[in-house]
Amino acid sequence: MSSGYTVRNLAVRVGGRTIVDDISFTLAPGEIVALAGASGAGKSMSAMTPFGLSAGVASGSALLDGVELVGLPEPDLSRIRADKIGFVFQQPLTALTPHRTVRQHLQEAAMQAGGAKPGKTAMVAMLDAVGLSRPEERLAQYPHRLSGGERQRVLIAAALAHGPRYLVADEPVSALDAALRGEIMALLVRLCRDRGMAMLLVSHDLAGIEHHADHLLLLDQGKVAESGAAGQIAMAPATDYGKRLMAATPRLSEPLHALPETGEPLLEVEGAHVHFPKPGWRRGRIDAVVDASLALAKGETLAIVGGSGSGKSTLGRAIAGLGPMASGTIRWKGDELPPRRHRSAEHRRLIQPVFQDPLASLDPRWNVADIIMEPVKWLVPEGHRHGRAEDLLEEVGLPCDFANRKPAALSGGQAQRVAIARALAANPHMLLLDEATSALDPLVADGVVALFGRLQRERGLSLLFITHDLALARRTAHRIAVMEAGRIVECASREELFANPQAEATKRLITASA
Amino acid sequence: MKPALIIVALIASAALLVPLLLPYDHISIDWNSVRAGLFTDGHLLGTDDLGRDRLARLLVGTRVTLSVALAAALVALVIGVAWGAIAGWVGGRTDEFMMRIVDGLYALPFMFVVILLMVVFGRSILLVFLGIGFVEWLTMARVVRGQVIALKQRPFILAAEAAGSPARATLLRHILPNVAGVAVAYLMLTVPHVVMIESFLSFLGLGVQEPLTSLGILVNEGSEEMDMNPAALLLPGGVLVLLIACLTIAGERFRDRLVDAAK
């Protein structure tokens, strides 16, 4: 009986449609194989269907330690899953049962293959192995007491509790903060190497996996576009798809491309503070932004980088007049901009936002033309309205006949382009891009980033680029401001920031993104 | 949803149109045939103990019940949507204050209020409308408020602010159209509830007044003679059950469809 996991000509059908076609790979004991590709490429389907964990129906062959999984009845599959395989899923927030403690999760996981109930020392050792601090205390805690990263560590501990030979990890770090991703990925890899476990890794983030996986498969629309040693593909992709995918993934190691020239100073923020009352009946306040100062010139891109909860979006909204600001001044060409409720149409016109979730930022009941022209109606005086929705659609690279569509008929990338067209409609001088590409697929996001570059050159726009992705900031921004716990801890040109990082937070981010 | 709606439409149009074709109305007394059985002397469903045509009374009763339900549900819709939308949109202390009023009204025993109204102002069909609508809007207000608060946090509302849309325009053009589906779904579930309340009030003798009739009154009358003439109870009772069931099914299907569409 040969050990290892061998997939030959795997196809997956869902409701009569073939989602995955003709996929083959081998996962030897102790090896790490990664399935990568854009969303909808069939990565998760190929990984999960042979184990009976998706809505799809598999055909072809998937041999696990000599046992054919395709066509195996569910009770047998269930026993194989419990015996040999650990699973780590994307959503650490929802993958733990809220009313059960960490101890109960670990016990259930360890006993699934008929193992004995683990003792306290064993469970503490499990949590210790995944790098959780104070493991004894953790055992009695409920999931809501843990942060996202801690929950993912608990999930990994639970996946390993029964000592599986294989680990299937479906986007294990995508829902985590940028600074945590590298750490958790390194933990998974170390656990595999230490225990001689094989791992099947599913991820859309090429930069995050290429150094960890041994073997890499690039999937495109359910087919293998490219397959080979991970380092090889990352260095020199052979296919067109591989090249595009690699080019679309920003890396800290890539050469810097020239950015457009910048002009006179436009925006100046001095000593901005934002705080919110604590939720519920508790007294006190949360300081979301503390003493933030920054400046932006015409045609310049300033990236604000930081982990979630660092206050970068709150600061951006305060600047655009879309959120509260307790104190501080915002000047536009030397004139002070009034606070949120007192901004005139002319003030609002200057700075227009693009948000993270493209579909949620379009009113589902309006059609695209009305959505795009909404700012014109309120912000542009009558007599000056000459733009048409169709021209704006063309400018953001969408066909004119999209004007009559409803947002539900748009893909994520198309919806984001509509949101960009809306932001351009009132002819602004600056765009606030609040994680504007992070909800999109790598290829689509790359297209949107290129669109921002083009708009900046053509219209002389200033961009405030809020992102968690340091490599993306390095690729697009003249200067980068790093935020942590509400403060701007460092702000420097991109060359200087990487050559000579000053703040601890910057160094940590650079290490995590490398 | 379709078959249920068709049954409701059939019942409603029968209640509206068929009395026009009948030789008897629901008030006049046929002295020649009092307590007639089914299919006698042109009385398809016979007559009651005062010699009034049962079919005419059943149809008019259905008409009254349905119109009370529709009117009361509309009252609930208008007050509830306005109240809930303002509370949810303005938020803060205004919201607290408005919703505490709703909580306070919830705490009043409904029957007690209705009886008090009847005693003070006398029995009238208008009062039945108002009394029921007055109670039903409370839940509508809560449902709408919750929806508005959820919508308020969606990015497209922030985008509307960035587009310079004044608060009132955002409420009217972005929030309310997106609440409409839920409000209509809830309205469709309110109607059968009101049908039940109205019938209950009429059964107790607190609803509409004789000689006008409603399904509740007919059920009440029928229950007194059910040992001799079960049809007198079963017919109005059957129409009532059919109406409530079909309206509820249609309302729930509509709500489910909205939930699916939102996914």
Image (cartoon, coloured by chain):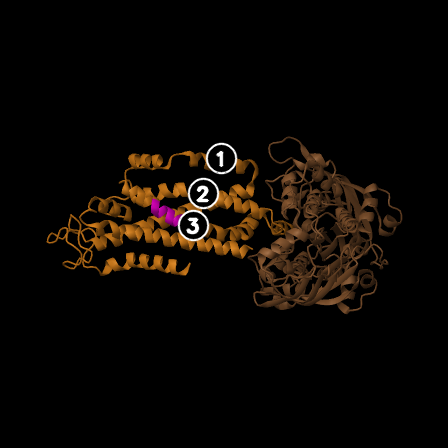
- Local SS, label 3: helix
Q: Which residue is mark 2?
A: B139
Which label belongs to residue A93? none
Task: Give the residue at x 32% y 42%.
Answer: B127
Q: Colour of chain A?
A: brown
Residue B56, horizontal then vertical, whole percent: 22, 54
Q: Which residue is mark 1?
A: B100
Q: Quadrant of residue A308?
A: top right
Residue A340, horizontal then vertical, whole percent: 66, 43
Query: Is residue A460 found left or right of A279 in the rendered image?
Result: right
Real-space Cα distance between discs 2 and 1?
13 Å
> Where does the magenta region start and end?
B189-196
In this view, the mark in front (2 or 1): 2
Q: Amino acid at mark 2?
A: Thr
Quarter placement of the C terminus of chain B: bottom right
| Residue A299 at least partly seen | no
Task: Give the residue at x 51% y 50%.
Answer: B179
Residue B58, horizontal then vertical, whole percent: 25, 53
Real-space Cα distance between discs 1 and 3?
23 Å
State which chain disc 1 sits on. B
Q: Amino acid at mark 3?
A: Leu
Task: Give the residue at x 21% y 50%.
Answer: B230
Real-space Cα distance between discs 2 and 3?
10 Å
